[in-house]
Amino acid sequence: MTDREPPIGSLEELLRGLAPQVLGVLARRHGQFDACEDAVQEALLAAATQWPAEGVPARPRSWLVTVATRNLVDHWRADGARRRRETAATLDPTQTIPTSPDDTLAVLFLCCHPALSPPSQLALTLRAVGGLSTAQVAAAFLVPETTMAQRISRAKHRIRNSGARFEMPAPGEQADRLAVVLHVLYLMFNEGYTATSGPNLQRPDLTAEAIRLTRLLHRLRPGDGEIAGILALMLLTDARRAARTDVDGSIVPLADQDRRLWDAAAVAEGTALLTRTLGAGPVGPYQIQAAIAAVHDEAATATDTDWPQILALYDVLDRVAPGPLVTLSRTVAVAMVHGPRAGLAALGTLDGDQRLRHTHRLAAVRAHLLEQVGDHAAARQCYLQAARLTASLPEQRYLTRRAALLAPRADPSSGSS
């Protein structure tokens, strides 16, 4: 591939798009993924500082490769291995830098190495592939920058100690590794769509980054149905973002949202992706979830929602990818089709599942169904229990408000005269 540069939108978009490409060039030439990643981060910082004042160079990728390589030279010089490496690494920022179309995918695979924990995979992906600084990644997870720097450093050391090299996994490993990559992107999107903690329900910066990276992955592997499926799922879900909170930041449940605020272009794009994908190959869990999201988005009003179709899709999802959260979501569909008592009966199958012990979702769904059957005292206790289990301030406020609405009221006729 020649050194053609991508169209320049915002400077931040340009740098994020170039970050994994530049890292790929350095890692293929020099190995030492951890040192190369640090050098690229320093080059991105230099570009963010210099380019607004001096203008974007004619070959921004080559400029970044050159500056990142010089950063590597400085690191090697400090280690006492200057001459040989410095001679090999000297580059001209105007020269053409060949890149491989698989470089970004190889970086994604490496960041999602099985030696890493899911939180480390996610943090490293945001930094190495997303081009975010350590401070930005730390802000995304609401932890101090020093804490995130240590997490990322440990992740890179684990990759180095595992003996992993910068290359695409063998064909036999790619399917499993790609599943991890998709899961990391899915986690990134979910954390942005409904933040697990903090003052805001949503983190649009994270959802946008997850969608950007998934688009990139889709361009690299356009024939993969699950990649298309997860991109459709993100688009169809994120389309509702503007309607999920009111002007005060309070949660607006799906049934009460003003659907005129939904992003029609995102719905159309997600639906078209799904239409092209379904039936073209094996159907996986992301395609099924996208189909469920599409049924919701196609309904003009909440009462128009085709809940029997949603329940049928959850039945398929439960066979393809069973798990407690799938069962929990299916319970809502059961209640909408067969009534809240049937939903409560289905919910009872999850009471002993330890995987739901630390999430508020089970108690929140139970509270909603108990409220529907008229057991307000039990519903109130479940709402309060759910509020205690979530670290999201908007969810806490929503759940405690629901509980307050169910609080018993004193009979004014019983007061003394």
Image: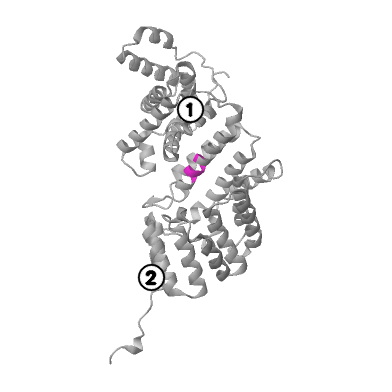
In the image, which residues are magenta?
184-189
Q: How many marks?
A: 2
In magenta segment, residue 188:
yes
Amino acid type at mark 2: Ala
Work out whether residue 45 or residue 108 is closer to the camera in this orientation and state it: 108
Q: Which residue is mark 2?
A: 404
Q: Quadrant of residue 127?
A: top left
- Residue 48 image point, x, y percent: 38, 28
Amino acid type at mark 1: Pro
Q: Which residue is mark 1?
A: 20
Work out whether residue 162 or residue 132 is closer to the camera in this orientation and state it: 162
51 versus 301 height, above or below: above
Q: CA distance from mark 1 to mark 2?
A: 50 Å
Q: Quadrant of residue 385?
A: bottom left
Please indicate, yes or no, whether residue 119 appears anywhere in the rendered image. yes
Residue at image position (33%, 34%) is 150
- Residue 66 image point, x, y percent: 42, 17
Could you tell whether 258 is left or right of 229 in the image? left
Q: Which residue, as the protein is rendered here, is positioned at the far front?
A: 352
Work out whether residue 97 or residue 218 is closer to the camera in this orientation and state it: 218
